[in-house]
Image: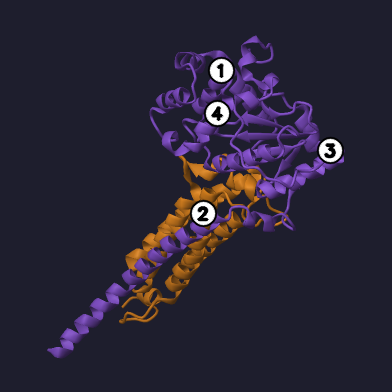
């Protein structure tokens, strides 16, 4: 039994749920809820409650809010659902899923950086729900990174 | 032997558990999402109203107003409803292929109905061509219908049936069908769609929108004040329009709220009829 397996499964030689992937799964659920909320906003055009320092309308109705006519939030929901699924599978001992989770989260982080850049420098407005999603992705990335560093110790 | 079977069952159950959790979350996400969608759709303005207090945000500064006044005029004569001399001007930039614009379209119809003749409503085409492949053609189709005095009737067709043509490879054929449906001379409609004047008008609106640094659709200005998206519900727009009317000494909105269809070309002020564009020096390059 390798050390890394202990990290992933929490305990060696049994199927105990791994704590780090489980934490990641819970965080991904939060991201999924956020993305579903934004998807619903997109289709119903119901305004989202937006803080004084934000301009959610400018962001959520910008030309960047869709890809090929499909709302970006749907892609976000799909990504969080896949991340959740991979994390759950990893939590039950599937190491390959955790590696895939890491790869996916890295891609999500890159895309998130691009979206934050768009808000900051192109649209020049922020939406708190988009920032929440960005934060969620960042936490997922840190969670994965933590598991990698733990593995090296 | 029994122990081994029990162990196998236990392992099998354990390996099914993550899949069961994933399935459960998927079902919960779909059902919960659908429930939220249904409840949000049923009360589109109630939720917005809660935002109109503390979260109300209007881009309202002198620099923005100065930009609004100095930006290129857009298509002339503009596609306009109401009174040309009204004290309150509502100017909307929208994209016919944008789903949110279709929703806001129904709200604008209500606003126009409520303030019939007491505000000036201007519609500007702002097709987001990077993401909406048929948006520009749709804007041109509306302008082509405008050449025959049926701009608003075509607009209604485009927004109401948006899903039918939004991603169609033969959207133009669909537009021909709408032209026929609203009683246009289809041959002239097709000629106008292919002609330069209609495109010039769309481009003029686009240029105005770009000068106003519009970052998304719909974008609505009321007397030069850019509304935050949260304010684009009927009640909040009424409050803003009423405040502007009061500033100018006019009466605010009536209490009665007749529900009427979008005005047809017959109710459009004659000066707003874009069919004059071919004669307008401002409307062609």
| Chain A image colour | orange
The picture places residue B38, in percent across and down from the top left corner, at: 49, 57
Q: Where residue B188 appears, x then y in whole percent?
A: 49, 13
Q: Which residue is under mark 3?
A: B250
CA separation in Å, label 2 and label 3? 39 Å
Q: Which residue is mark 2?
A: A40
- Residue A142 numbered tag: none
Q: Are marks 2 and 1 on the same chain?
A: no
Q: Chain of mark 2?
A: A
Residue that extends furthest to the left in the rendered view of this protein? B1
Q: How many angstroms separate mark 3 from mark 4 (CA)?
A: 30 Å
Instruction: Give the Cα distance between marks 4 and 1.
Output: 11 Å
Q: Quadrant of the C terminus of chain B?
A: top right
* Residue A70 in view: yes
Q: Is residue B199 left or right of residue B87?
A: left
Vertical side of B224 occupied by A135: above or below: below
Q: CA distance from mark 1 to mark 3?
A: 34 Å
- Circle 4 packing at 10 Å, graded few (<14), some (14-19), many (20+), is many
How packed is label 2: few (under 14 Cα within 10 Å), some, or many (20 or more)? many
Secondary element at image label 4: helix
Asked whether disc 1 touches disc 3, contact meaning CB atoms under 8 Å apart, the reply is: no
């Amino acid at each position: 039994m390798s050390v890394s397996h202990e990290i992933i499964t929490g305990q060696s030689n049994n199927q105990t749920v791994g704590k780090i992937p489980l934490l990641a799964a819970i965080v991904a659920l939060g991201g999924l809820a956020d993305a579903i909320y934004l998807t619903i906003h997109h289709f119903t055009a119901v305004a989202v409650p937006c803080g004084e320092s934000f301009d959610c309308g400018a962001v959520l109705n910008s030309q960047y809010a869709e890809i090929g006519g499909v709302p970006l939030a749907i892609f976000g929901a799909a990504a969080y659902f896949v991340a959740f699924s991979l994390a759950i599978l990893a939590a039950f001992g599937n190491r390959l899923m955790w590696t895939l989770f890491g790869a996916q989260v890295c891609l999500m982080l890159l895309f998130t950086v691009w979206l934050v850049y768009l808000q900051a420098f192109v649209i020049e407005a922020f939406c708190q729900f988009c920032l929440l999603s960005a934060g969620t992705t960042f936490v997922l990335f840190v969670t994965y990174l933590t598991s990698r560093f733990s593995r090296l110790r | 032997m029994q122990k081994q079977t029990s162990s196998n069952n236990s392992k099998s159950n354990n390996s099914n558990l993550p899949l069961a959790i994933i399935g459960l979350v998927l079902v919960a996400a779909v059902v919960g999402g659908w429930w939220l969608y249904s409840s949000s759709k049923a009360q589109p303005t109630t939720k917005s109203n809660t935002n109109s207090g503390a979260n109300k945000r209007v881009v309202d500064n002198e620099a923005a107003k100065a930009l609004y006044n100095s930006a290129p005029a857009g298509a002339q004569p503009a596609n306009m409803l109401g009174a040309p001399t009204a004290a309150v001007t509502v100017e909307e930039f929208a994209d016919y292929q944008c789903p949110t614009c279709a929703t806001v379209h129904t709200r604008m119809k209500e606003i126009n109905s409520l303030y019939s003749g007491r505000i000036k409503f201007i519609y500007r085409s702002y097709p987001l061509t990077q993401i909406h492949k048929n948006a520009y053609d749709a804007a041109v189709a509306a302008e082509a219908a405008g050449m025959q005095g049926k701009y608003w009737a075509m607009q209604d067709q485009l927004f109401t049936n948006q899903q039918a043509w939004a991603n169609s490879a033969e959207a133009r054929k669909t537009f021909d069908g709408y032209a026929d449906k609203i009683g246009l001379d289809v041959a002239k409609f097709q000629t106008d769609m292919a002609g330069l004047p209609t495109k010039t008008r769309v481009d003029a609106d686009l240029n105005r929108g770009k000068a106003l640094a519009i970052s998304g659709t719909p974008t609505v200005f009321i007397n030069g004040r850019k509304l935050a998206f949260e304010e684009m519900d009927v009640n909040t727009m009424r409050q803003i329009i009423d405040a502007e009317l009061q500033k100018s000494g006019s009466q605010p909105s009536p209490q009665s709220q007749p529900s009427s269809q979008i005005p047809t070309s017959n109710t459009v002020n004659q000066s707003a009829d874009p069919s004059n564009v071919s004669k307008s020096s401002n409307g062609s390059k």
